[in-house]
């Protein structure tokens, strides 16, 4: 926004640098413009009467604010946390949730421990919903359907993802991106829990994804993501298991969404055992990437357009 320069920045208010600005010349007499050469005790010339800011000049009005110069309002944020028997991990996860999150949705996968009571104890405002169908994919889809925020963030309940990174994801959504995913493979990211088998599998699947979708992603099998809820239909999620993370990325690429990657540090699971089966789930991810590749089947957006 253009504004009138403050008095100290105007040409007529600058302190003298040479003898032609109205102060004493080399010979000690008045400068060429007729002002006397009075100086402060420290040797700096005094300000002239004409150096005062007399307020706005009616003949030169200040520029008005444009219609686009509005303060950006903060978007509401829903955090979806799928959990099954994570009572020992929930306290750490919930106490790390930043204040920018407006709604926390715990999707309970028929836990046999105190996952739900513990969540309510740690965060009385948490919304607990029962998972519809088995698998992480069903859990996330249940949580997405229940979310009301303009932005949706998804993290695991095992403590492997630090909720303190959420503002980094929201920053890119606020600046025009539609889908933001965490990456362990760019500067500032990393993993303290990635085994050799998982690392090799992730690299192989990432190469396939970049080839099939003409992308330049740096990480694939990592479920720390955020997106605009208005694009939930475009993502057209159908998977029931861990492959839903690859499906989300594949459909985001196919739909032409603006995707950003942010560095993220994967932490070790704080307690318990993971439900991930590296080989079996890796095969499901590969099958998803091939099945959902561009041209394999029409996207949800294209199907809706054809039905009109």
Image (spheres, rainbow, N blue to C red):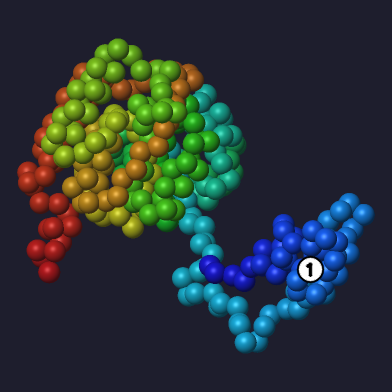
Q: Which residue is mark 1?
A: 31
The residue shown at (61%, 82%) is 61
Q: Is residue 128 visible?
A: no
The residue shown at (80%, 75%) is 34
* Residue sitting nearer the eye, 97 or 53: 53
Which residue appears farthest toward the right when viewing the image?
Answer: 41
Where residue 282 appears, as percent x and y from the top left, is 21, 24
* Residue sitting nearer the eye, 264 or 93: 264
| Apparent side of residue 70 relative to residue 276 in the rendered image (left or right) | right
The residue shown at (66%, 67%) is 11
Q: Locate the C terminus and report the quarter of the image it occupies.
A: bottom left
| Apparent side of residue 146 relative to residue 215 in the rendered image (left or right) | right
| Apparent side of residue 15 relative to residue 292 in the rendered image (left or right) | right
Above/below status of 193 relative to 50: above
The residue shown at (24%, 23%) is 203
Q: How many marks?
A: 1
| Apparent side of residue 28 relative to residue 195 in the rendered image (left or right) | right
Where residue 264 appears, as percent x and y from the top left, is 43, 31
Where residue 197 appears, as percent x and y from the top left, is 26, 14
Secondary structure state at the residue bearing disc 1: loop
How packed is label 1: few (under 14 Cα within 10 Å), some, or many (20 or more)?
some
Q: Is residue 93 visible?
A: yes
Above/below status of 108 relative to 303: above
Where residue 131 appears, as percent x and y from the top left, is 35, 40
Above/below status of 163 relative to 33: above
């Amino acid at each position: 926004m253009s504004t009138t320069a403050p008095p100290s920045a105007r040409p007529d208010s600058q302190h003298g640098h040479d003898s032609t600005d109205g102060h004493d010349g080399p010979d000690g007499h008045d400068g060429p413009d007729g002002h006397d050469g009075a100086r402060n005790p420290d040797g700096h010339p005094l300000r002239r009467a004409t150096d005062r800011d007399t307020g706005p000049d009616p003949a030169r009005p200040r520029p008005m604010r444009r219609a686009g110069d509005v303060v950006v309002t903060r978007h509401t944020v829903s955090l979806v946390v799928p959990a099954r028997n994570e009572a020992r991990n929930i306290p750490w996860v919930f106490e790390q949730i930043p204040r920018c999150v407006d709604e926390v949705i715990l999707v309970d996968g028929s836990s046999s421990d105190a996952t739900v009571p513990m969540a309510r104890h740690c965060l009385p405002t948490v919304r607990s919903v029962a998972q519809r169908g088995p698998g992480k994919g069903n859990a996330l889809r249940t949580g997405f359907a229940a979310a009301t925020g303009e932005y949706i963030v998804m993290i695991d309940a095992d403590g492997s993802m630090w909720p303190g990174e959420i503002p980094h994801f929201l920053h890119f959504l606020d600046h025009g991106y539609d889908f933001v995913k965490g990456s362990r493979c760019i500067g500032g990211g990393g993993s303290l829990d990635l085994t050799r088998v998982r690392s090799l599998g992730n690299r192989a699947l990432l190469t396939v994804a970049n080839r099939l979708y003409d992308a330049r992603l740096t990480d694939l099998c990592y479920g720390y993501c955020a997106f605009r809820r208005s694009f939930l239909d475009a993502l057209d999620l159908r998977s029931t298991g861990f492959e839903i993370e690859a499906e989300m990325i594949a459909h985001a690429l196919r739909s032409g969404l603006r995707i950003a990657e942010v560095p993220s540090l994967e932490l070790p699971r704080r307690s318990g055992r993971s439900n991930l089966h590296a080989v079996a789930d890796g095969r499901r991810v590969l099958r998803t990437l091939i099945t959902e590749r561009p041209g394999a089947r029409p996207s949800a957006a294209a199907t809706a357009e054809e039905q009109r």
